Amino acid sequence: MTISEQLRARHLDAVSQGVGTRQIYAAHALNAELWDVDGKRYVDCAAGIAVTNTGHCHPKIMAAAQAQAGQFTHTCFHVTPFEGYIRLAERLNAIAPVSGPARTMLVTTGAEAVENAIKIARAATGRSAVIAFTGAFHGRTMMGMALTGKVVPYKAGFGPFPSEVYHAPFPNAFHGVSVEQALAGLNNLFAADVDPARVAAFIVEPVQGEGGFNPAPTDFLKALREIADKHGILLIADEIQTGMARTGKMFCMEHSGVKADLVTMAKGLAGGFPLAAVVGRAEVMNAVNSGGLGGTYAGNPVAVAAANAVLDVIAEDNLCSRAQMIGERMAGRIAEIAARQGMERIGQVRHCGAMIAIEFVTDRTSNAPDPAMTSAVVAAAEARGLLLLSCGTRQNVIRLLPALTMPDAIVEEALDLLEASLEDALAAA
């Protein structure tokens, strides 16, 4: 019995089956490579779901975390604040895509950031309703699930959810939903279900993550900003997966030029340490009474030190440009593969920086989703030593999230492994 098999047996006896996992048990990782407990090497195109944008165990980030751990690991910022938190807040305030002076609060997870953004929006507007979008993913807490526009596996069996949450259509040209149709759906929502005067906020991902790496068109984001301003609604940009240089900008909203009122961030913020943030316009963030925000572990000192180092690494290593280069190379190569005879089940290849998606369909006429092919490619890649993730409301999209520090040679290796995995899956179909 292998070590992985032994761990799998213990896993099944000890861990809730509701915690979905793969059967790859990590032993160590470095930059864009990961080794399991049996010594098998993987090229990592998952990055812990867009967390290790700066690669596994980046030496500057590890050194910063180790130095902080030697000083103190916890004080609770509410009891004895510390300089690292303040410095990180100053830096995030300076770069977040919001208008005017900004303020920051730190928490631990992306879902917690979303929860607090909704709290802040309600406090600032005195309104209760929130509008999210079909295909959205905003976390696994009760409010996060209410905002999420994907039922399986995130919402099934967990209701009822918090009230006053509505969903409007998200534009998706590949599946026949234009910007005009999405905006018409929003207007229908105002006419039929919720008075815009009761809406505290829109919350939108500039590129949907779990929904299938679907980019929000610039025209759509600009229209949302105009509608928000017209009705006194706040615009929350969920940059949890798209932030920290992932899309070729520090934040994805920068591609559109649209400013948000509140921005949530997590994942790549601290290079693998648990940290999240809400950054917003000062007058909005300061609308909450003292003591209304925070938490015992919010802004852990070790994670904060890591995050300050992450911002240094992104700037010093020019990772925004690197994300663009990796995305163009990967998406270009995959598009070449898709154009070959026999690859018609690749319906679309799309990317925004180093967020790359392959959508699988049964045929390119109907664009009907093909989740079975998606699963087969992920499994074939795993067998060959390539870590991939699937996503999409119909489970028919593969997403690639390479570390932005991935060397060119490993980028090419990842693409070779992906091409071979596609051929394996098609041959077995």
Image: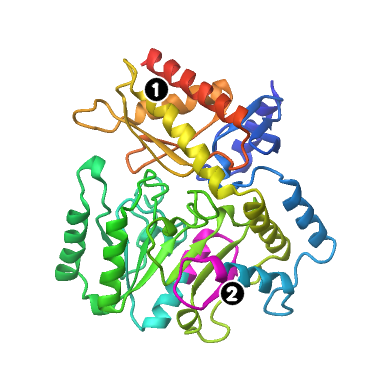
Q: Is residue 267 found left or right of 129 in the rendered image? A: right
Q: Is residue 16 in view from this perspective?
A: no
Q: Is residue 115 in view from this perspective?
A: yes
Amino acid at the residue labelled 2: Gly
Query: In the rendered view of the protein, which quadrant contains the C terminus?
Result: top left
Q: Residues within 10 Å of mark 1 (few under 14, many from 20)?
A: some
Query: In the rendered view of the protein, which quadrant contains the N terminus?
Result: top right
Q: Can you identify the residue that label 2 sits on?
A: 294
Q: Is residue 2 above or below residue 103?
A: above
Residue 36 occupies which quadrant of the picture?
top right
Q: Which residue is rendered at x = 46% and y = 83% of the image?
A: 283
Q: What stretch is highlighted in magenta?
A: 93-116
Q: Is residue 331 above or below residue 167?
A: above
Mark toward the viewer: 1 or 2: 1
Q: Distance between the residues labelled 1 and 2?
A: 48 Å
Q: Which residue is rendered at x = 67% and y = 79% of the image?
A: 78
Q: Which residue is rendered at x = 34% and y = 77% of the image?
A: 128
Task: Say if the magenta span includes residue 111.
Answer: yes
Q: What element carries label 1?
A: helix
Q: Which residue is rendered at x = 68% and y = 71% of the image?
A: 87
- Residue 144 location (% of width, % of height): 43, 60
- Residue 374 location (% of width, % of height): 39, 29
- Residue 310 location (% of width, % of height): 66, 55
Amino acid at the residue labelled 1: Ile
Q: Can you identify the residue that label 1 sits on?
A: 337
